[in-house]
Amino acid sequence: MDANSYRHRGLRRALVEELRRKGICDDRVLAALGTVPRHLFFAPAFQTHAYQDKAFPIGEGQTISQPYTVAYQTELLRLAPHDKVLEIGTGSGYQCCVLLQLTPHVYSIEYNPVLFEGTRKRLTALHQHAHLVCGDGSLGLPEQAPFDKILVTAGSPTIPRPLLRQLRVGGALVIPVGDAQAQRMMRVVRESEDEFSREIFEEFRFVPLLGRAGWGG
């Protein structure tokens, strides 16, 4: 993955320190964000925005998530190096690339075919090798289940049952749940075949999770 320049590496180091001050403490997560060249996920005219801690539009009504949000969700996942992880909402591919710094076993689903095609080409150019699928992420990827971890990068009105069924016992789902204005981050752990525990964290605002088990259901 091309970090491009000394200047961009310096901007990433500054971003990592900002995230550390905001409470992100997992060194592996911080190192991942310090590695991925976020500016390459922006059109050239907007690259000056890349290392600011904010979300930014990427077209098709979607955004590249705020770095703090990416770090926060990734930290909640508690990824181990050999975990098999499913990401719901590939978007720009930035979060996907952060996950790939932590485990090579990443599957990612994008609902929007225009975004999917552009992101597939971008990740190929960056030599980032996730298993990319265009489809209804709210239904998960049952043919590849079970997953150790599932990450949802869009706001859902409820916790989609298909995703719960695709977690292995001991696995965790991180998902923002709420209404169209704001969602609370949740971590759901599959304790047994039929039992799940849940924790509720900070409030965020995400684009809606589209699909049969999301806002389209």
Image (cartoon, helix red, strand yellow):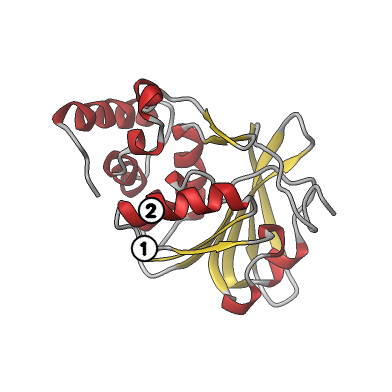
In the rendered structure, the answer to whether residue 138 lies left or right of residue 83 reads right
Q: Could you tell me if residue 152 is visible in this image?
A: no
| In the rendered image, the vertical position of residue 52 relative to residue 1, given as above or below | above
> Going by the picture, which residue comes out furthest to the left?
6
Give coordinates of residue 52: x percent, y percent.
40, 23
At 62% across and 37% down in the image, what residue appears? 60
Element on which disc 2 rests = helix
Q: Nearer the viewer, residue 191 or 41?
A: 41
Point out the tag, 1 or 2, that comes first from the N-terminus.
2
Residue 202 in which image quadrant: top right
At 44% across and 40% down in the image, what residue appears? 71
Which quadrant of the figure contains the C terminus? bottom right
Q: Which residue lies under the disc numbered 1?
A: 129
What type is the residue that disc 1 sits on? His
Q: Nearer the viewer, residue 196 or 154?
A: 154
| In the rendered image, the vertical position of residue 123 relative to residue 180, given as above or below | below
In the rendered structure, the answer to whether residue 212 lies left or right of residue 174 reads right
Residue 172 in which image quadrant: bottom right
For residue 89, which numbered disc appears in the image? none
Q: Nearer the viewer, residue 199 or 93?
A: 93
In the rendered structure, the answer to whether residue 117 lies left or right of residue 45 reads right
Q: Nearer the viewer, residue 60 or 53?
A: 60
Q: Which residue lies under the disc numbered 2?
A: 123
| In the rendered image, the vertical position of residue 44 relative to residue 134, given as above or below | above
Residue 59 in which image quadrant: top right
What type is the residue that disc 2 sits on? Leu
